[in-house]
Image (cartoon, helix red, strand yellow):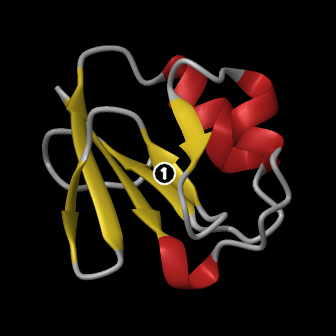
Amino acid sequence: MYEVILDRDDCEMCGNCVELDETLFTFDDDDLATIVGSTRDGNIDELEIDDAEIYSEAAENCSGECIEVYDDEGNPI
């Protein structure tokens, strides 16, 4: 199991994550990226996932560096 974190305070609205997979990422009413199906705590989106590949790619392509992916021990991948 992995955890994806998106810190909306760091989102630069580049759209790289949405372009990568708009079924997993979208822009909300504030024009900031959000993870589809995530829960929000403050301005942080969190989602537990089984396959980290596409989320890791989104993290690598994010110009605002607002997406992070962690393994089940809390280590960044």
Give the residue displayed 58% in from the left and 21% down from the top. Answer: 54
From the viewer's side, name the closer residue of 75 and 61: 61
Q: Which residue is mark 1?
A: 34
In the depicted structure, whether residue 49 falls above or below residue 61:
above
Residue density around tag 1, few if under 14, some if 14–19, many if 20 or more, within 10 Å: many
In the depicted structure, whether residue 2 falls above or below residue 39:
above
Query: Residue 18 placed where, x, y %?
Result: 71, 35
Quadrant of the image occupied by residue 57: top right
Give the residue displayed 59% in from the left and 39% down from the top. Answer: 26
Quick check: 24 left or right of 14?
Answer: left
Instruction: Residue type at mark 1: give it.
Output: Thr
Quick check: 14 left or right of 49?
Answer: right
In the depicted structure, whether residue 17 falls above or below residue 20:
below
| The N terminus: image quadrant | top left
Query: Residue 47 placed where, x, y %?
Result: 24, 41
Query: Residue 34 placed where, x, y %?
Result: 48, 51
Give the residue displayed 43% in from the left and 24% down from the top. Answer: 52
From the viewer's side, name the closer residue of 60 and 36: 36
From the viewer's side, name the closer residue of 4 and 29: 29
Q: Residue furthest front?
A: 29
Quick check: 5 left or right of 34?
Answer: left
Circle 1 sits in a helix, a strand or a loop, which is it? strand
